[in-house]
Amino acid sequence: MKPSEKAPTALLSQINEVRGQITQTQRIWMMNIAVCLVTAVVGVVAIQMPWQEHRQQLAAQYADEKERAELLQAIVGQRTQLQTLEKKFLLEGGATALTGQISRLATEASLQIESVAPQPELALEPYMKYQIEILASSSLMNVLRFLRSVETHEPLFWVDQLEIGELPGETVSFAGMGFDQQTSTQKQPADLHRIKLIIGALARQKVS
């Protein structure tokens, strides 16, 4: 081989060698970059996945707490309404208060009360029902007035029993003093009737 032919061959060999070194360097760089990318992705995933799980847990906990808060608010609202209704409809003071209030209504309706007798109490958990029996005489018009006032009264009263009967036609009255007493008879008004009522009211049971 001539010297002139060896020179290009050696040059090409050097160029190929340099190119090979450059290609190998690029491969190393690309491998390093790929390793860095994989490491970064793995790191991001390793950080992101626990955070996603934690965020989902926080979201579920927030939803539960919100539901509990709404339920508690609804319970408080219902309890307030119940307390308002109890103040409006429940009796305070027991049989004594029931007797006093019914006697007042009867007097306002012009019922002539003969007797008022407490009846046995009835336990209706969580309430207690008080009852009284009233014997009176009155006209039917006054009885209707009394019943109307009882129906619209607060606290709420129940008429558990109502009996209307005729009074005896005559009553005997005594006049004078001493041994020489004179008797006279009086006729009862035609519209006067004997009334028997059993009226009840509810009260909250006392906590023992």
Image: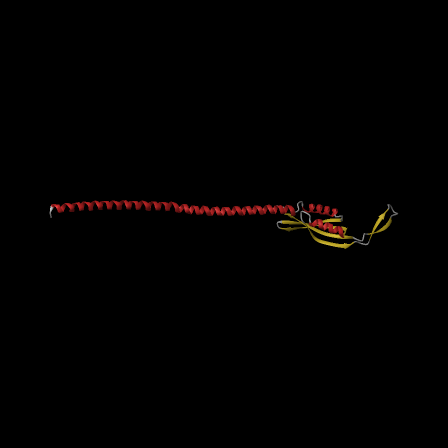
**In front here: 13 or 128?**
13
Q: Position of residue 3 (x, y in %)?
A: 11, 45
- Percent coordinates x, y for residue 144 in the rendering: 73, 51
Q: Please provide percent x and percent y for residue 151.
A: 69, 50
Pick the front one: 91 or 19: 19
Colour mode of the rendering:
secondary structure
- The residue drawn where x is 23% and y is 45% is 22
Q: Nearer the viewer, residue 176 or 17?
A: 17
Q: Quadrant of residue 80?
A: top right
Identity of the residue furthest to the left in this view: 2
Mark yes or no: residue 119 visible.
Answer: no
Q: Position of residue 119 (x, y in %)?
A: 70, 50
Q: Which residue, as the protein is rendered here, is positioned at the far right?
A: 180
From the viewer's perspective, tell me whether residue 99 is left or right of residue 70.
Answer: right
- At 60% across and 47% down in the image, what residue appears? 81
Looking at the image, residue 187 sits to the left or right of residue 13; the answer is: right
Q: Quadrant of residue 11?
A: top left
Q: Residue furthest front?
A: 4
Q: Quadrant of the C terminus?
A: top right
Residue 196 appears anywhere in the view: yes
